[in-house]
Image (tube, rainbow, N blue to C red):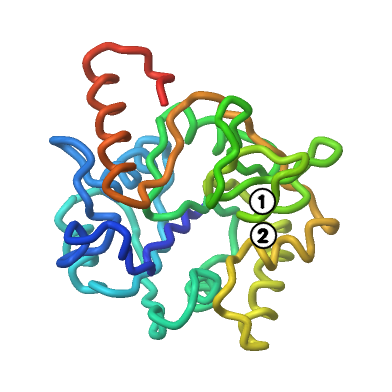
């Protein structure tokens, strides 16, 4: 299994916090940045191979990951037109490295060790969702039909659950999705989400909803998110319930 971490975004909503490095290098506590925590948890879970897409500050991110001295094989792929495209094109750029079972995550996602373990140990392809989190206005929702995810996007509300971009995709399922991602990009449709491609082939394979309820699994989009998630991590270290969100 390989991990695919998407780090080609500009992180503009973070303001000055991303003026000198990518958003994934934002400090979330005294020990970790977003990406160092992701890589450490992946290593602890036995994932050795990581494909990381990059955009702005490519060299800074490469040097930082090397400085962590983790026993991981990290292959970096820079999206050369990161300013004009969405991460669907970053995945397309990395496609030759992704012929495997995949654990896919956005580079601004913070999750608990338990959430990662549940994701990796799913026998079926899955995406993390939450039945206890209110549907967000602007973030991902997953439409659930007959126990499987039918569509993913920010625009869906009916029959939907709050969703986060942490997936475990079995190789055969991933190949179907990746082929559609390639088709989108080769036809010039590079500014949408990779999930737009999934929505067109969701009848061909199954991604099951993995309900992590109130476990920590959330993106950091802005300084307010950073403050909230850093506070959760601090409380967890102070002995509070690890399931706090």
| Neighbourhood count class around disc 2 (C-alpha, 10 Å): few under 14, some 14–19, many 20 upward | many
For residue 96, above or below residue 39: below
Label 2, on which residue?
Answer: 174
Asked if the residue at tag 2 contacts the one at tag 1, i.e. Cβ–Cβ closer than 8 Å, the answer is: yes
Q: Residue at x 43, y 61 (%)?
A: 6
Label 1, on which residue?
Answer: 170
The secondary element bearing badge 2 is classed as helix
Q: Quadrant of residue 142?
A: top right
The percent coordinates of residue 119 (x first, y second) are 56, 37
For residue 242, above or below residue 210: above
Q: Residue at x 63, y 82 (%)?
A: 189
Q: Quadrant of residue 43?
A: top left
Q: Residue at x 86, y 37 (%)?
A: 146
Question: Label 1 to label 2, Cα distance in Å?
Answer: 6 Å
The secondary element bearing badge 1 is classed as loop
Q: Residue at x 33, y 69 (%)?
A: 10
């Amino acid at each position: 299994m390989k991990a695919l971490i998407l780090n080609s975004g500009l992180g503009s909503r973070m303001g000055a916090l991303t003026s000198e490095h990518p958003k994934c290098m934002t400090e979330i506590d005294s020990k970790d940045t977003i990406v160092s925590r992701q890589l450490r948890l992946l290593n602890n879970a036995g994932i050795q191979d990581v494909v990381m897409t990059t955009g702005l500050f490519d060299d800074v991110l490469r040097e930082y990951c090397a400085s962590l001295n983790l026993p991981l094989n990290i292959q970096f792929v820079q999206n050369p037109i990161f300013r004009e495209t969405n991460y669907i094109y970053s995945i397309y750029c990395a496609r030759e490295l992704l012929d495997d079972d995949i654990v896919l995550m956005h580079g601004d996602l913070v999750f608990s060790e338990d959430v990662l373990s549940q994701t990796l140990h799913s026998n079926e392809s899955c995406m993390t969702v939450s039945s206890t989190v209110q549907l967000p206005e602007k973030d991902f929702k997953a439409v659930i039909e007959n126990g499987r995810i039918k569509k993913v996007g920010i625009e869906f509300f009916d029959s939907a659950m709050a969703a986060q971009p942490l997936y475990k995709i079995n190789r055969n399922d991933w190949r179907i999705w990746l082929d559609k991602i390639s088709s989108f990009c080769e036809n010039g449709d590079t500014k949408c989400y990779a999930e737009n491609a999934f929505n067109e082939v969701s009848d061909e394979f199954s991604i099951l909803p993995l309900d992590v309820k109130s476990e920590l699994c959330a993106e950091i989009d802005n300084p307010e998110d950073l403050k909230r998630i850093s506070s959760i991590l601090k409380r967890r270290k102070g002995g509070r319930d690890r399931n706090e969100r």
